[in-house]
Amino acid sequence: MNIESRQPKAAKAMGPFYQEIIAKDGDAPPVLKLEAGVPQTSEDIPLDRFTSQDFFDLEMKKMWRKVWQYACRDEHLPETGDYYVYDLGRHSIVLVRTESGKIKGYHNSCLHRGTKLKPSNSSGYSAQIQCPYHGWTWNLDGTLNEVPCAWEFPHLDYEKNRLPEVKVDVWNSLVFINMDLSAPPLLDYLEVLPEHCAAWDFTDWYVSVHARKELACNWKAAQEAFIEGYHGPMVHPQLSGSAAQQQHDIFGDHVSRDLVALGVKTRRGGVEVTEQEVLDGMLMGDRSLVDGEKPRVPEGSTAREVMARQMRDAYRTQFGIDLSGMSNSEVLDSIKYSLFPNLFIFTGISLRILYQYRPLGNDPDRCLFDILFMRPVPKDGVRPDPAPVTYVREHESYRDVPGMDPGFGLLFDQDTQIMRWQNEGNHATVKGAITYSNYMESRLRHLHNTLDKYLKA
Ligand SMILES: [Fe+2]
């Protein structure tokens, strides 16, 4: 059965929709005024897609090895010889900045006896790529340079023993890999993303906080928690907004998005809040943006207007960046694009974050979830190094990650703690299926639809 692809009218009772809010602002760019909707069907989805080893193996073979996927930021390997290891299931790719300045990616396995050339999750500098077991050594361009006791290997063809490569491409300072050497170009894969992000440059930004947590759930379940706001009232009782106002758009197989207006009054639980309370709530999200006295909402103004002004002032004084040409929506809102299969990009100024999801080992019940907060490089300053990865163990809190805002830390704790419960319940099911909502959970179904296109190809 086909469903209504626009926001259900009944949700209006909870407050204004995103399009109404930005129409009132009067300054939103065309790309945010778009409403593509979420055209789909509403059938149940089998739950064994999350739990079955066979299904996981099929995903690995037919999807993960065929798609462009986000690996790291350009800034993670700025100089010749810098490397960064991207692990994916049991695959491991070592990305290297070569002498030509280009980034190359190699399967992280020695051609002698298979040892990993660089440890998982590592990064650093290395003039050559040397196996830590017997010392076979490759040049950064992947050519075999040296084999200790070479006289033992008269049968070795050096030319045939170049490190096997993956495809690598960079868009907007994000580094992507594809294990399929015959894959179409990254730009084709990105669909509308480059066009939509034309005004949102990530190059002059750096990673200010980087948290990585192993989750006891399937990689799709981890991702799903962040493309629906339906769980808000149960999992995040401290939040006052309503998820029913969130706009969802599906643009193609790989790209969808959600738009959430910040700094607006919504109704949840019938409680009316004041503009000042809305502003206070927003300022909790990023205390670094407030110098000195707590801002007030003047009579006749709104929290949204005050907060947008606050942001523009803070960016001018702290980073030397002029945001006067940016709309309130771009400055304030949560604008989040999903790129199948492993990346979410927040493109707004106040929330510029990357989420990365990937299977871990050969296990449908485990995945890695990376959160990268980004900050602008000060116009007159030196580019700071990207923040090192802070690992968050299952019973640790994101609030203890250096630089993490406590409000966000709490949100991430809540989101990730529910996942073990969900995963265990997925295995305990007798229904054997998921029933998604039509609009708020539409992009979860879309994730499965796109996945199926790869699995059936
Ligand atoms: Fe959440």
Image: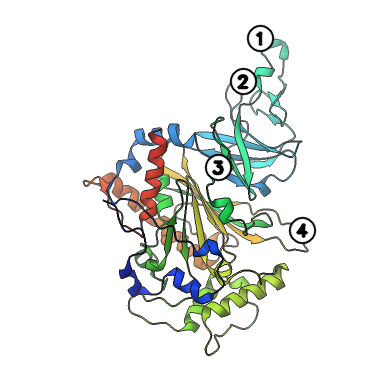
Q: Nearer the viewer, mark 2 or mark 4?
A: 4
**Labelled disc at residue 155:** 1
Which residue was labeled with disc 4? 382
Query: Label 4, label 1: how many angstroms apart (C-alpha)?
Result: 51 Å
Disc 2: which residue: 112
Q: Closer to the N terminus: mark 3 or mark 1?
A: 1
Q: In terms of image quadrants, where is residue 200?
A: bottom right
- Mark 4 belongs to which amino acid? Val
Q: Residue at x 73, y 28 (%)?
A: 139
User: First in sequence: mark 4 or mark 3?
Assistant: 3
Image x and y of residue 29, in percent: 56, 66
Q: Nearer the viewer, residue 129 or 250?
A: 250
Residue type at the position of mark 2: His
Displayed-image quarter of ligand 1: bottom left
Considering only order in the chain, which callout, 4 or 2, is on the residue closer to the N terminus?
2
The residue type indicated by label 3 comes to Asp
Secondary structure at numbered mark 4: loop
The percent position of residue 58, horizontal first and vertical second, equals 39, 33
